[in-house]
Image: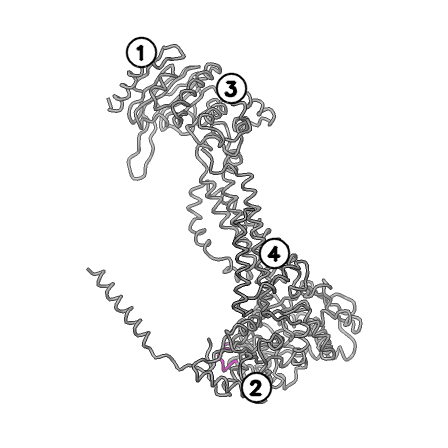
Amino acid sequence: MRPLRILLPILLVVGWEVAAALINNPFILPSLTTVIPVLAHPFSTEYTLGSGSLVENAAISLGRVTIGFFMAAIVAIPLGIVMGRSPWLRDFLDSTVELLRPIPPLAWVPLSLAWFKIGMASMAFIIFIGAFFPILLNTIDGVKSIKLTWIEVATTLGARERQVLSKVILPGSLPTIWTGLRVGFGIAWMCVVAAEWMPGTTRGLGYLILYAYNFGQTNVIIAGMVVIGVIGILIDFLFKSIESRWFFWRGLER
Amino acid sequence: MVSTRILAVAGLVICAALIAGCFTPSPAKSMVTLVLAKGTGPMPTLLGTGQIDGYIAWQPFVEVAPLAGIGKVVVYSQDLPPAGRWVNHPCCVFTARDDVLAGNPDLVNALAAVTILSTDYVNAHPDESAEIVADWLAGKGNFTYGNISVSSVKVLQQAIPTVRFTNEPTEKWMDGNLEFVYALRELGAITGSLTNTTDDQTRALLFSTAPYYKARSMIDNHSFVVPATADKEMGIGYLNSDHDAALFVAVKKWQYFNNTYGIALVPRDTSASRPELADLVVNGKKVATFRLIPGDAGPQLMQMIATDTAKFAYVGNPPTIAAVDKNTPVKIIMALNTEGSGLVVSNDSPATNWTGFVQWAKDRSAQGRPIKIADPGKGSIQDIMIRYALEESGLSFSEG
Amino acid sequence: MTLIIRDLAKSFATEGKPPVEALASLNLEVLDHEFVSVLGPSGCGKTTLLRIVAGLETATSGTVELDGGAVTRPCPRMAMIFQEYSLYPWRNVLDNIAFGLEVKGEPAAERRKVAAQYLDLVSLADFAYHYPYELSGGMRQRVAVARALAIEPQILLMDEPFGALDAQTRNMLQKELLAIWEKTRKTILFVTHSVDEAVYLSDRIVVLSARPGRVRDVVSIDLPRPRDRTSPGFAAIRRYVLDLIEDAAKGQ
């Protein structure tokens, strides 16, 4: 990792401690010395108000997000491919998609609870909503930007419709789809906090933060936020490294 | 050109409105500002950062303030004016949906029995119960406010004695609940079926106390009726407060209740601080599975009742009254506790009792800096009590 | 093998305007092993003609017949080579060449062996596992030719294949194309803008009229190959064809 990349986080940490000392009101800016013990004992339940260890909560949140994310991918990618190929279907669905897209996943919470009752289903739905649109729109985009020549090469070499789909459209649009998946997972990860604020769970990083908030335990809240951020960055890194391995050819086509 | 003319007129109108707004005389400033929070969680932090001057909340958030050094207790809820009105005031109640009352009354009786036995235990073993509640709420960990950490066990051990745990739905207790109905009417929070009912009609709509008496007699006769096995999992909603101590103690001390009485709420995960699932076992037979669902506040619990997400709720009475007013099919069976709330102010306030508090409010108001007091939400017990108290003491207030 | 184009006409519908007639009553016959170039003024429809022959577009009227059978969709007896952006960037060179065989269902080992042979034919044997982005423009077109040849078509349809390359590479590829043509004995229908290129490569040059395109002239070139660009014979034919195109452009 290039040293410049971790310079700012380090500066922020130092700056935080200095500011905390200067402001001298631990409620406005708690010193990191209250947050660090929470982070330093990720497997302990002692520091998380009886809500399970940080690691356990992180694993549960990750599991939920992964499920909701996969559901979104399973629906959005095929739909995106079909919409990318079919202008009339795009016309048909476009206004609805654009209407639903700006509605924040959080706003779906009341309906989600009403439709899916409390529990995994209502949470998965919120995460699904979060991940769905980036994946869908990137898939459509990826498919639309497939060069006509690529398709014509395939048909003149004897490919049938299904082969064009599997041997040209899919591999050609995969880099853009992958970007959609990466962005979609990032949003889904943000939604997990909102999703876990719904009643029906006593585990998860989002729930932990809410619970800590209800007891005014800022240090636990900040520790939760740090964990969320770290996991987010790790996953993004994962997506990006796969991208550089599989899709090195992107943008270089001529 | 027509369009420029329209623009000019519009511009003039807007200017006029702005100018008029600037010169409109503002209404008379009130002496106290009530900050309606959503629950009690942020209150200590708000007090610590000086964004509020005090708060009225339920335990253990009252004790948190002095123990964390961010404030001091001015008065406990039962001592708020009007004098004597709030002594032994009802607070939390045990409620059940109409359908489970009608469809499986034996189950309701059994759950009521467990709750009664547990309440007796809490009264007999306050320190141990405090530990159990600290475990449930905070995993027996520390509460950290700013740089100060206090042990949750310590906080609860100080808080539990200020709460009166009792179950019997006495006449006096039921009247106490009616006081809240009157108060809510005056606040304009009741607009439905309880708007114009007589006291008798109100009682009929609110209470179904038979399960308490059946439970009591089962306990006295040492013989419990085994209810029909419920086929579906049922929800029990509760609050993260020591007012629901009876529920926590019932679940955590399940072995004791099972061995001593043959009836218990057995948690599925016996090592968890805050179990999510518990089975009701009567005379060795598992008769129901309950999902224990914590809510942020009373109204949310009543929403769970209304949507049939929960069949039972350990909740405050004003939200229940408001729910009945909106035709939610729920009944109050018995009390869980009375009193157990308090008013806390910042450390630099001169107030040490209610009288001092009133004086302080008047002084601050005269200086043009009315005090800000947070309460857990409109229509909550604490909200009603503080409004009454302020009015009684001649302090005007507004929501801010 | 004969390719017969009879009375071919193509109109494109345009919104709100009268339809554009790209081709009108075009007649042409291409014989086995011939190298035929199609030239004409701008917009004369030469690419449209090629695409209809390839089966990528359908004629408004008229027919294209390959050995008596009508051509209405792409068929593997004709392979097309495009000007650019035709290699699949996610596949290495070998797998690009093997694409047509993969589509046919040939097993991997088999098709890679055949692909390697054609890679050799275009003198790029060392680049089997390279990716298109690593190759120069000229190399990519050679891969495209190998890919087309791998399915062993009878006719190669080439749409200005060297148009995006610099002059030197272009000349080099023209020579290579001729070598491959002589070796594999394919029939080639070649669309180009460059008179020079057409005279260098072809047995016959078909000059189309201005839009709507129809066959205006056919010029046979008897010069032996390899042709000398500097020879007077070459220059004369080039002059002649240039004049034809200029006249065609003026609508004469």
Residue depicted at 32% across the width and 74% down the height? B22
Q: CA distance from mark 4 to mark 1?
A: 81 Å
Q: CA distance from mark 2 to mark 3?
A: 101 Å
Disc 4 vs disc 3: Cβ atoms closer than 8 Å?
Answer: no
Q: Amino acid at mark 3?
A: Leu
From what the image shows, is residue C16 above or below residue C101?
below
From what the image shows, is residue B116 above or below residue C112?
below
Q: Name the residue carrying label 3.
A: C121
From what the image shows, is residue A131 above or below residue B111?
above
Q: Name the residue carrying label 4.
A: A61
The quadrant in which the C terminus of chain C is found is: top left
Residue depicted at 56% across the width and 61% down the height? A113
Disc 4 packing (10 Å; few <14; some 14–19; many ≥20): many
> Mark 1 falls within which chain?
C
Q: Name the residue carrying label 1.
A: C232
Q: Amino acid at mark 2?
A: Asn
Tag 1, which secondary structure? Answer: helix
Quadrant in the rendering for residue B86: bottom right
Q: Name the residue carrying label 2.
A: B353
Q: Amino acid at mark 1?
A: Pro
Q: Amino acid at mark 4?
A: Ser
Residue depicted at 62% across the width and 61% down the height? A36
- Check if mark 1 and mark 3 are on a common chain: yes
The magenta stretch is B184-191
> Mark 2 falls within which chain?
B
